Image (cartoon, rainbow, N blue to C red):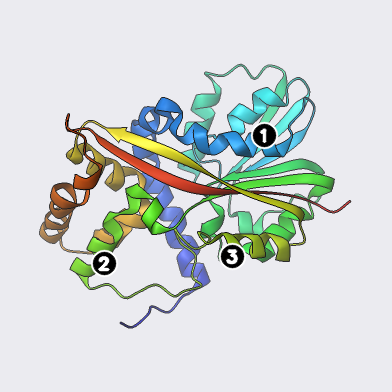
Amino acid sequence: MPTTTFDRQTYRTKLRQEWREAAPGWRRWFPTLEANAAMRQISRPLLVEAELRPGQRVLDVATGYGEPGLTIAQLVAPGGEVLLQDLSGEMLDFARDRAEWTDLREVDVSYLEGDVEELDLEDLALDAIVSRSALMYLTDPSATLARLRSFLRPGGRLTASVWGPPSEVAFATPVSLIRDLLDLPAPELDAPGLFALADEDRLAEVVRDAGFENLRIGRTTATFVFDSAGEATRFLRDCAPPVSALVDEAPPQRREQIWARVTDEVWQPFTAEDGRVHLPNEARWISATNPG
């Protein structure tokens, strides 16, 4: 099967648009994502490994709706500072709304809309950089992490998570069926995407090539629970641009046929006797230090 030709600028522009359009879905499904400690399970090792303390300055890369950044803000208070960065202004708007529900009186929170691959923080000395479920979308992760490392003080910490391989990420199970039904070309092996850093050796190589030391890698799982197969599909369409975008260019009738197949077939192995769908999604986390 032929592969597509990768163009960095086209990809980053498309990625921004996809996440802008997904922002309403993330608002709608926020309770599900955070219920039963689902995504918080992904955040937990990042917070522990970052060794956060009051008064520190921390960057949350691709914060989305403000996590784990807003949780970090409470850990670095009093006197700390958290910078929430995201490619999508609409996602940051949700983070701002959530900040109003949180006690942030003793910490400084700021919002940075823009591409992390072009981020310039030379005037700041960060104590930690944290990123949840985002590094795999970078077009040149080692180069970007090397730039971010230059903003860290000596001994500063990097902690990040990425999704594991397709067989261990249940919400992405429909991808193979969708590609088959639409006869889509295979992505380039080195192209950014949902599983670009799923291999632990590759993840470690990227971080090490960026100049970090003292690497530690671990695994954790976020389980999303839905009342029905139809609800699981609606979640995917609303909140997973890398998956839903595969279907978006098909004619409307064809799109609905594909999503019906997903609902009727893909979620069956994850459906309990009561009809609820449980999707376990394994992530890899990594921590490292900036050489002092």
Looking at the image, which residue sits at the far bottom?
2
SS at badge 2:
helix
Labels 1, 2: front one: 1
Q: Quadrant of the N terminus?
A: bottom left
Provide residue 279's location: percent of width, then percent of height.
33, 41
**Relative horizontal placement of residue 86, taking residue 213 as reference (left or right):** left
Name the residue carrying label 3. Answer: 202
Name the residue carrying label 2. Answer: 179
Marked residue nearer the N-terminal end (3 or 1): 1
Q: Is residue 141 above or below residue 120?
A: below
SS at badge 3:
helix
Q: Is residue 56 above or below residue 203?
A: above
How many residues crowd around disc 2 within 10 Å: few (fewer than 14), some, or many (20 or more)? some
Amino acid of disc 1 = Val
**Relative horizontal placement of residue 249, taking residue 31 as reference (left or right):** left
Q: Which residue lies at the image location 60% right of the left edge and 67% below the top edge?
A: 140
Amino acid of disc 2 = Arg
Q: Which mark is residue 138?
A: none
Residue 236 in view (yes/no): yes
Amino acid of disc 3 = Arg
Q: Residue 210 lies in what quarter of the image?
A: bottom right
Q: Which residue lies at the image location 30% right of the left edge and 59% below the top edge?
A: 175
Provide residue 32's location: percent of width, then percent of height.
36, 30
Q: Which residue lies at the image location 23% right of the left edge and 62% below the top edge?
A: 177
Provide residue 227's location: percent of width, then percent of height.
22, 30
Name the residue carrying label 1. Answer: 48
Instruction: Determine contact: label 3, label 2, CB under 8 Å.
Output: no
